[in-house]
Image: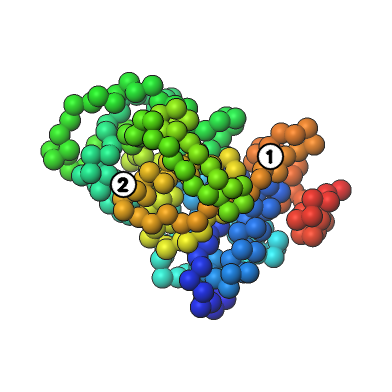
Amino acid sequence: MTSQPPSIYRGRLAPSPTGYLHVGHASTFWTAYERARDAGGTLVMRMEDLDPDRSRAEYAEAALEDLRWLGIDWHEGPDAGGLYAPYEQSRRQAIYLDAWCKLLRGGFIYPCRCSRKDMEAALSAPHEQDLLDDEPVYPGTCRSSDFAASEIHEPGNFNWRFRVPDGDAIEFVDLNLGPQRFIAGRDFGDFVVRRRDGVPSYQLACVADDAAMKITEVVRGEDLLKSTARQILLNRALCFANPNWFHCRLTVDRNGRRLAKRHDALSLRALRQRDVTPTQILSGELP
């Protein structure tokens, strides 16, 4: 752990320990590291281990080790401590429940009785899925649910969805990709914020943690642009300030396909075992 710098800039690294990190992660996390370093700011390591079925301690440990080996350093995190601990999402459930309560009181969410299969896209960040697109547009099956928020005191055995303002344009300027514009209800629909098994969605946990940890800039892959639109709506509903956004171009393989954790040969762990250097990985000059 290095000393806290004086800058108000606060960035974060947010790996999901559902597999070994690959060269695409390395590029994005290196960009996040460089931007925090160049701003003289603080870099936070947050382990996004929400998925109880896929998250593994060995992957979390490998992520910390591989990113250190790559040359990335951070000021706060699971292995470094900090004012906003704990830095593992699996230990931050009270924060997500509080956010859910605020959304409920504000009338922004409703219970959804759709099946688990319908919900399976809601937990992970879209870039962790095998789908080419992220969470599909919800058809509104349960949107007209008749319930009294004043009579509900806990989430119960329901999935909960955020009711998007149909037709509203969600616009933001990405610091890397420029102006972005998505139409609620067309480009994305009512999205899950909490599953019936008590696990908050990626969208809700990300927003709650970025606000609680006072993150000023989010650096991540361009496959999360629609997630940014959703998170802007959540920030608005929760009265959180939006951070700045910087979305990186995705790293693709030789066939033009984006990388995923199933590409074991391009994992940082496998490349290290082949004596590939950090410089080769970051320059894209792999043997």
Residue 178, given in percent of the width and then of the height, sits at 59, 48
| Residue at figure coordinates x 71%, y 49% from the top left | 23
Q: How many numbered marks have been drawn onto this rendered protein structure?
A: 2
Element class at badge 2: helix
Mark 2: few/some/many CA within 10 Å (<14, 14-19, 20+): some
**Real-space CA distance between mark 1 and mark 2, rounded to the nearest whole angstrom:** 34 Å
| Residue at figure coordinates x 23%, y 39% from the top left | 107
Describe residue 83's horizontal placement relative to residue 35 as left or right.
left
Disc 2 marks a residue whose amino acid type is Ala
Describe residue 276's horizontal placement relative to residue 140 as left or right.
right
Q: Which residue is at the front of the view, 231 or 63?
A: 231
Image mark for residue 259: 1
Residue 69, given in percent of the width and then of the height, sits at 70, 63
From this viewpoint, is residue 60 visible?
A: no
| Residue at figure coordinates x 17%, y 43% from the top left | 153
The part of the image, by quadrant, that contains residue 94 is bottom left
